[in-house]
Amino acid sequence: ACDLTMRDRRRRRAQHERLLLSLFVAMLNASPHSARAWTGEVTLKLAVDLNGGVDDRAGAKSERFTSGFALDAVHRLRRASDAVLVGVATVVRDDPSLTVRRVSADRQPLRVVVDPTLRTPRDSKLLTDRAAPTVLFATTQPREHDDDDAIAVEPFASLEALLDTLETR
């Protein structure tokens, strides 16, 4: 692990704060065309290392730095969730399952990937394991041979629109 300067730590913290703020604004602005307020709930989970990072980009392979206790808590959160959302960089780097595995569950949450240019690898667990329904939010059209019924591709315009779409599912 590399040592970060105080400036780097502040920069990472500012990035995390901007992410949280953009999610909050998206929740407030969801469904601007309707008279009702958005009724959904968002839980944000981040694993942050001592340097304020969520990933050691210097390493060749992403390494887990959360404890078994924390992982059990994450899987309890997933069990109580309707959907689990990640960005495509997480899929490319970590190949996650985004399923409930460490605790018992009656159902799996919807797996959601914000993937503007459809970079999700065809051999990723999300596209091949059929363990849970999966939705990719993209700004580009699906490739012609992407006709798998288990994978939905929805248009991505904004976080607000994404939340609206998820609320209707």
Image (cartoon, helix red, strand yellow):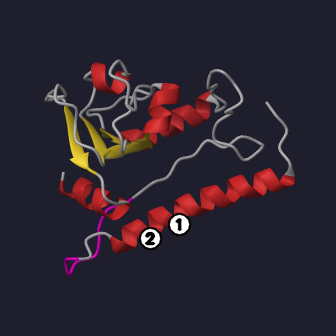
Residue depicted at 29% across the width and 34% down the height: 108
Residue depicted at 44% across the width and 28% down the height: 96
Q: Which residue is mark 2?
A: 25
Q: Position of residue 166 (x, y in %)?
A: 26, 53
Which image quarter: residue 36? bottom left
In the rendered structure, does residue 34 fall within the stretch colored magenta? yes
- Within 10 Å of the Cα at label 2, are there few (<14), some (14-19), or many (20+) other Cα atoms? few
Q: Position of residue 103 (x, y in %)?
A: 42, 29
Marks 2 and 1 close (CB-CB < 8 Å): yes
Q: Relative to 135, is 58 above or below?
A: above
Side of 9 where 103 appears, left or right: left
Q: Position of residue 70 (x, y in %)?
A: 59, 36
Which image quarter: residue 105? top left
Alpha carbon of mark 2 to alpha carbon of mark 1: how far? 6 Å
Q: Which residue is mark 1?
A: 21
Query: Magenta segment, principal secondary structure?
Result: loop
Please name the amino acid that badge 2 sits on: Val
Helix, strand, or loop for circle 1?
A: helix
Which image quarter: residue 149? top left
